[in-house]
Amino acid sequence: MDEAFAPTLAAAQARIAAVRPAVYARTRNSLQGAVSGLSPYITHGVVTLADVLRGVSARHALSVEHKFVFELGWRAYFRHVWQHRGEAILQSLHAGPLPDDAYARQLPADIRQACTGVPVVDEAVRMLYATGMLHNHARMWLASYVVHVRKVHWRSGADWLYGHLLDGDLASNHLSWQWVAGTGSRKPYLFNAENVARYAPDAWHSPGTVVDTSYDELDRIARQPASRAPRPLEAPPGVTSRVEPALGAEPPETLGLTAPDAAAVSGRDVWLVHPWSLGELPAALPAGTVVVGIFVADFHYAWPWSERRWHFVGSRMAVLANERWHGDATSIAAALKGARSVRSVAEPHLATWLPRWARCEAAPALFPPVDQRCDSFSQWWARASRSLDSAADLLAVNEVPAW
Ligand SMILES: Cc1cc2nc3c(=O)[nH]c(=O)nc-3n(C[C@H](O)[C@H](O)[C@H](O)COP(=O)(O)OP(=O)(O)OC[C@H]3O[C@@H](n4cnc5c(N)ncnc54)[C@H](O)[C@@H]3O)c2cc1C
């Protein structure tokens, strides 16, 4: 995976143009496979799922059942679950292999410092800290080791990973952890050293470690309490620890954010840009509209970010908005009070506040809405893709405006 994630629309469009769906379908499980690296851009609304599919299907004929479309579907499905379950996605959706209180609430230092001595885990943590990104398979391996081998509650692992990812999304991240943990799926996700050897480069291979065993044995480990779980080995000599990058609730000063400023918007039409709506501005904003970027401190205190992510989001926002505020919900609300009108794009990460301040347009969806709550991806997919054959049908059904 390319390590550079430039916070620009051009970078997102270049990644869309580079998608090779046939190679993707063949290689996506491999760490060196042809994955798109689009998730930081999708998470922050630089491009939408519809933009991605439109760009890819303009170059390659795609059926709705194509693996690439299916994976876009996973993101939409997790949002569907969030919409129906709300904050409940942050708790176990149902019982997993062990009761919630059988798991520790603290992520052990050797995992945080990438020195467990299990190469697949240590390499994943190093890559996460170095790039803010991880391949899907690496996320699954890391989460499975944390929960089932080390008996750490999925929520602690999910909160930690969310903070370090450039693409951290509460629905995709926390529900994927639940899927791995077995609290959002029928069985826990387990992996062994043979699986790692098939899909990862040599440095990740983990022969002779706790994961070098059979799936029956891994299943037994997942279902036995911590007291009987295998003890982590001392990391072998030569495994050097990493310093965990700090996560911050406060934006770096270099982003040039100011406190909410009522004078800047008094009597004006306002378009609010937020960290999840960093696409192009609407073409039809009334003349004289002030574009204001906001960071809601209440959210960031609950969910701190890495410096890399602050810069990714802050740099893109600076291109869109001259006024960029960081403040608590009360001070943002007070500053916006005197505006003539306030509009924005709806976003579940800000659902507690944004609808009180702005008339929100729905973010453009790719898949048709599924009103009935679906508790499995396959249930949701059957409804969302019903009577559609091609990606073009999918785009047509939602009549998404082009960029
Ligand atoms: C434990 C765990 C945590 C995760 N946390 C996040 C997260 O915080 N944010 C996030 O966007 N994804 C998350 N994912 C899903 C997936 O790993 C990433 O979306 C994917 O690795 C991003 O890389 P890519 O853009 O190259 O994906 P590609 O394979 O190129 O896929 C294209 C797009 O489809 C979507 N997508 C692909 N696979 C998945 C999937 N399994 N679930 C949901 N959407 C998918 C993403 O939007 C992605 O950008 C998580 C998965 C796991 C197992």
Image (cartoon, rainbow, N blue to C red):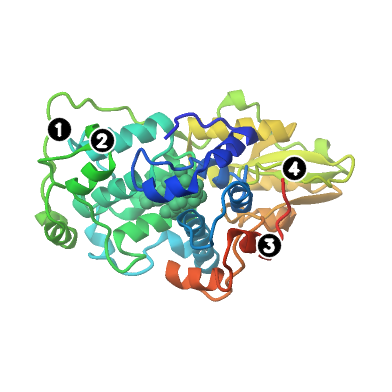
Residue type at tag 3: Ala
Question: Which residue is denoted by mark 3 in the rendering?
Answer: 396
Q: Earlier in the sequence, mark 1 or mark 4?
A: 1
Q: Are marks 3 and 2 in contact (CB under 8 Å)?
A: no
Q: CA distance from mark 3 to mark 2?
A: 45 Å
Q: CA distance from mark 3 to mark 1?
A: 55 Å
Depth order, front residue of 96/329: 96
Left or right, 213 with respect to 99, comes to: left
> Circle 1: is it few (<14), some (14-19), or many (20+) Cα within 10 Å?
some
Q: Secondary structure at mark 3?
A: helix
Measured as percent of width and height from the top left, residue 281 is found at: 75, 42
Residue at point 71%, 41% (across, down): 280
Question: Which residue is denoted by mark 2 in the rendering?
Answer: 122
Q: Earlier in the sequence, mark 2 or mark 1?
A: 2
Left or right, 196 with respect to 174, comes to: left
Residue type at tag 1: Ala
Residue type at tag 4: Leu
Q: Earlier in the sequence, mark 2 or mark 4?
A: 2
Q: CA distance from mark 3 to mark 4?
A: 22 Å
Which numbered disc covers residue 281? Answer: 4
- The image quadrant where one finds the N terminus is top left
Measured as percent of width and height from the top left, residue 384 is found at: 55, 69
Residue at point 21%, 42% (across, down): 197
Q: Are marks 2 and 1 in contact (CB under 8 Å)?
A: yes
Q: Secondary structure at mark 1?
A: loop
Q: CA distance from mark 2 to mark 4?
A: 41 Å
